[in-house]
Amino acid sequence: MKLHLTLGLTLAMAALVSCADNAQVGVLTEPTSATTNFPGSEYPKINPDLSAVFRNDMPDAQSVAVNVGGKNYQMTKGEDGIWEVTTDPLVPGFHYYTMNVDGKRIADPNSRQFFGSFYWSSGIEVPEAGVDYYLEKDVPHGAIEIVRYDSKLTAAVRECYVYLPPQYISEPERRFPVLYLMHGAGENETGWATQGMMRDIMDNLIAAGECEPMIIVCEHGVAQLAGVEPAGGFNLFNFDAFEKVMVEESVPFFDSHLRTLTDRDNRAICGLSLGGFQSYTIGLNHPDLFGWIGGFSGSGRGPGDRRDAEMYPKSLNDDYHLLYISIGTDEPAGMYQGIYDLHVALDSLGVNHVYYESPGTGHEWLTWRRSLHQFAPMLFK
């Protein structure tokens, strides 16, 4: 328990120092176009109080609304045919949103699109005062590459987003540890590279000397074996096919195609929400492959797992360098309780782990950015 309390206090003090040094970061003094807008699109704008103004030119529409931050806002049409609405103040961080035009859900033509909730929707980034760890800085930049490989198990081409640290180019003889980083349900392999701001988080940590340079592989977290119908129909929480693809195809492919360090001490697996359950399930099933495991807003061997000494033996302390668990304080009550209870169970079983609560955030990307920012520096040390 002391580990968790000491870590929490240290992080809180670091956050205060960071905010003091970067007091003006994220602070708006006038309405400002969202960074998630398409280039040249003025709206939506973020006000200094973090409310958002949406304006759309749809003169022929009869009814227009925007749904953001879990609330539906009916827009008003002006004499010039422009629809407009100002929202309540929004929580800092990234929000998916959609528009409803005459009963049809559409993406905002002013915004870039992001994949979440099983479809492409708009997104708006609300700045967080005093925080810059996920913003682009004047540091050496790594690269995000799209890598495709032929999967014989699924009889399909699988697509992954891969982060290569700056040193991958500047030190061509060097080999690197690998983090397999999973997305959540309803999202895909693009999530960490876009909504998650993975590249900037890692570039900044590496440039500050706080994190080992590493390769990050973002797999597509769903797989169906060719010619095999899942018993009882498709079930997101049945990881068997995806686990087989990860172990037999994905890890071997990247070890043979990238300059990786190929031992389990230099391989980690982590994910958010559903990806956290996948990471714990796969990681604990394969101690020969993974030496580090993390789960953000999701961890343990899937829903309903037993939390006893047989499922989580004390020998895990010798088998793994790190078990990491995080949750947002404002997540849905059942979700928060489930992750907190796992933390308590592991404590009672004497299983070493790091537990982190993201203050004031829910089941959202700000929780997961904070978690990655804390988790990555712990790896491969």
Image: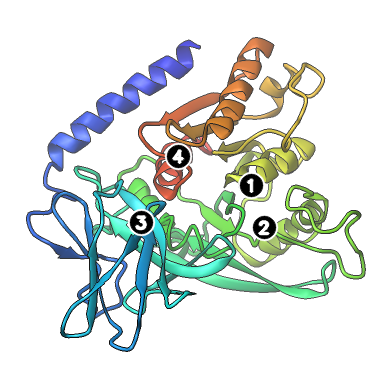
Report if the CB atoms under discs 4 and 1 are less than 8 Å apart: no
Q: Which of marks 1 and 2 is nearer the N terminus?
A: 2
Q: Which of marks 3 and 4 is nearer the N terminus?
A: 3
Please say if 235 is above or below 225: above
Task: Tell me: 294 left or right of 126.
Answer: right
Q: Nearer the viewer, mark 3 or mark 2?
A: 2
| Distance in Å between CA atoms under marks 3 and 4 | 14 Å
| Distance in Å between CA atoms under marks 2 and 4 | 19 Å
Tag shown at residue 381: none
| Distance in Å between CA atoms under marks 4 and 1 | 15 Å
Q: Nearer the viewer, mark 3 or mark 4?
A: 4
Q: Position of residue 332 (x, y in %)?
A: 51, 36
Q: What residue type is labelled 2?
A: Gly
Task: For residue 278, say whether it is visible.
Answer: yes
Q: Earlier in the sequence, mark 4 or mark 1?
A: 1
Task: Tell me: 21 left or right of 131.
Answer: left
Q: Which amino acid does label 4 sit on?
A: Ser
Check disc 2 and report the residue beneath it.
221
Check disc 3 and report the residue beneath it.
200
Q: Is mark 1 on a helix, strand or loop?
A: helix
Report if the CB atoms under discs 1 and 2 are less than 8 Å apart: yes
Q: Which residue is drawn at 39% across and 16% down?
A: 6
